[in-house]
Amino acid sequence: MSTTIHSQPFIDQRPGTSGLRKRVRVFQQKHYLENFVQAMFDAIGDTENQTLVIGGDGRFYNETAIQTIVKMAIVNGFKRLIIGQHGLLSTPAASCVIRKYNAFGGVILSASHNPAGQEGDFGIKFNIRNGGPAPESITEAIYQLSQKISSYQIMDCDDISLSETGTQYLQDMQIDIIDPVADYAELMADIFDFPAIRALLCNGRFQMRFDAMHAITGPYAKEILEKRLGAETGTVINGVPQADFAGGHPDPNLTYAAELVEEMFAETGPDFGAASDGDGDRNMILGHGIFVTPSDSLAILAANAELIPAYQKGLKGIARSMPTSQAADRVAQALNISMYETPTGWKFFGNLMDADMVTLCGEESFGTGSNHIREKDGLWAVLFWLNILAIRQQSVSEIVRQHWQKFGRNYYTRHDYEEIPTEFANQLIERLQIQLADLKGKSLNGYIVDYADNFSYHDPVDNSIAENQGIRICFTDGSRIIFRLSGTGTQGATLRVYIEAIEDNPDKLFEDTQTRLKDLIALADELAGIKSITGRTAPTVIT
Ligand code: G1P
Ligand code: ZN
């Protein structure tokens, strides 16, 4: 029986960089999730007779939320649901499944790498028919509707079973519970040279470690790396997804993937190491004794794309988020293909990929992907690297060093200041904003400002404009300092400072990043007043 439940708007339901993310206890408030889901179903167009994909990263509250969404989907007209077994689908797998089954869209339950559990975070986002995150026009419409909502529709019935694959019916709505890994694994086998990777992984010398960080990629990595590609059992560590990610923070970077980093830098460490995040869309790439920055990784993948079966015919173009280093730009120039600079967030790449203007996309925040789906894809990046290693028969470190020798190096770091009071963060951005107009042509500690602005993006496909996407101060030698506030945090504000310097001198390619960038780091503090306004003397996380 369908019931109309009366409720009132919650003022905090505006989706951020990647959907609505809040503390679990916020989502547990009566009507909170239901209001958002109703606003979502109302905003996305005619849902009558449509197919909807549902899955999440398995964190605490995943299955509870799915049961609610199922009971609302039926009343909102959906005819078929495709749900990952146990409610699981990594974000890239969800994108893959939406595309493969030509679904109307998908609901992904995840707060990515944010800690999980009763005291942790939860999140929900809608992906459209192309498999990618809903554009801002839709997320804004969801928010507007959530602010006017007075009731929602829900079926009063028992929970469905998520534990076995197969088909079941809720009245006349068909529900298919699918293996969350199979479709995705098949897609990977279509893209990469699996026999070559298998030969590398089974040559008796090559050692690899993949850290699933107790999150969703465990089953995917075990199936693909260990089962299909023959990597030794135990290659995948922390491979059983847990509802609280074992109390960890599954963000694959030098701070949070410390266990893997330590192993990779040990004297007898493996040849190749990688990690993925809570929902499987991020990746970190390491070689023995070397960390590959995500910006360099994008550039290296682009420069080696012709070694991969799916990209052999060449790339249409490359896109990167504005704060991502310009390393890939040099590759695009050498390949004579277009380079696009978009605001932070994967949703801005969707139009470019749909219009066939770009093949590879990347963000400095450990996100890389291609037009095979419309989300960034952690394991895809790992397989891309393995494919390159298998063909080139060189170490990660040799490949990176040769890349710098050929294209020059973009020294790059990001400093995050987490959980600073919102008023301090706003004060700091305002202080930067008022300086912008006068900066052009000025010499700051020897760096001459080429231009300074608050980045605004004009989408060449749908002509939409996204403003205030980050303060950038760019110098005549190509170096840059960028400031922006995070749109994914759930507590206070997070300031991100991105610093980049370009080096073409072959004698200066192998210096320590923080040392090489220290003048620009100091300049960033001077300009923004980070220490004086926030009282913080050091960043929370350096990547
Ligand atoms: C962060 C990253 C951004 C990424 C997003 C979702 O957003 O910086 O590149 O797309 O997470 O994974 P932010 O918190 O900076 O708004
Ligand atoms: Zn993620």
Image (cartoon, helix red, strand yellow):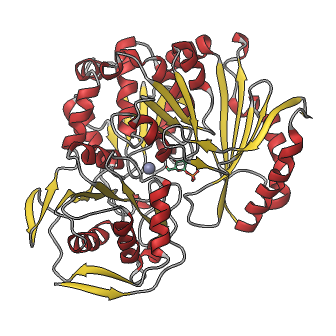
Picture coordinates of residue 204, whole percent (x, y): 28, 19
Q: Quadrant of the N terminus?
A: bottom left
Q: Which residue in the rendered view is the most extreme toward the bottom?
A: 6
What is the x, y in percent for residue 475?
79, 30
Q: At 46% across and 74% down in the image, what residue appears?
A: 146
Depth check: 170 or 192 in front? 170
Please say if 393 is above or below 158: above
Q: Quadrant of residue 292?
A: top right
Above or below, 437 against 359 in this view is below
Q: Quadrant of the C terminus?
A: top right
User: Vertically, is 537 above or below 501?
Assistant: below
Q: Please give the name of the residue rendered at 25% of the width and 46% of the height, measured from the top-left corner.
A: 97
Camera-side residue: 329 or 62? Answer: 329
Question: Residue 391, how many percent across, how many down?
Answer: 35, 13
**Residue farthest toward the front in the current orientation of the protein:** 463
Q: Quadrant of residue 220?
A: top left
Residue, x 44% and y 72% (percent of image)?
Answer: 24
Give whichever of 294, 539 is nearer the camera.
Answer: 294
Residue 271 visible in rendering:
yes
